[in-house]
């Protein structure tokens, strides 16, 4: 599955979930002037590719839950591969 949030400047927070045959996939994000916090839940037996937007959220550094594998990164996004479980990604300070 792919998690690739599109974060409009007019919103500060969003939450979404969907039931799948393997379990519930959930994501939420909260944005402030200098930080983005993205939470993702991936069902057991499933993997996901998670895109973390960087541009406009303070510093370019992304802090990810231990075990998230960075696939690629540039000035606008960082893309991670994750397995089942709960994952948190933070940008900015």
Image (cartoon, rainbow, N blue to C red):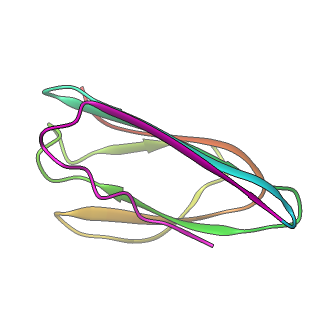
- Image quadrant for the C terminus? top left
Relative to residue 59, is residue 67 depicted above or below?
below
The image shows a total of numbered marks equal to 0
Image: 11 above or below 44 = above
Q: Is residue 72 left or right of residue 50?
A: left
10 part of magenta stretch: yes
Residue at coordinates 13% horizontally, 38% vertically from top-left? 10
Residue 57 percent location from the top left of the image:
17, 40
* Horizontal and vertical percent position of residue 75: 16, 64
Q: Quadrant of residue 53?
A: bottom left
**Eyeballing the image, is 15 above or below 85?**
above
Horizontal side of 1 relative to 12 (left or right) equals right
Q: Residue furthest front?
A: 19
Residue at 22 percent across and 36 percent down: it is 11
Give how far across and how far down residue 34 sits, in percent. 16, 28
Q: Is residue 53 above or below residue 75?
A: above
| Magenta region | 1-20
Q: Is residue 64 magenta?
A: no
Looking at the figure, which quarter contains the N terminus?
A: bottom right
Q: Residue at x 60, y 55 (%)?
A: 68
Percent coordinates x, y for residue 33 in the rendering: 13, 27
- Which corner quadrant of the image does residue 91 belong to? top left
Report the front residue among 60 and 22.
22
**In the visual, does 23 lie left or right of 87?**
right
27 or 45: nearer the eye? 27
């Amino acid at each position: 599955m792919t998690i690739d949030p599109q974060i409009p400047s007019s919103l500060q927070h969003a939450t979404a979930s969907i039931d799948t045959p393997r379990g519930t996939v959930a994501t939420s994000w909260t944005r402030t002037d200098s930080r983005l916090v993205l939470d993702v839940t991936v069902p057991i037996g499933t993997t996901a590719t998670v895109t973390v937007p960087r541009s406009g959220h303070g510093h370019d550094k992304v802090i990810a839950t231990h075990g998230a594998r960075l696939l690629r990164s540039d000035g606008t996004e960082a893309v991670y591969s994750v397995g089942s479980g709960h994952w948190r990604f933070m940008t900015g300070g």
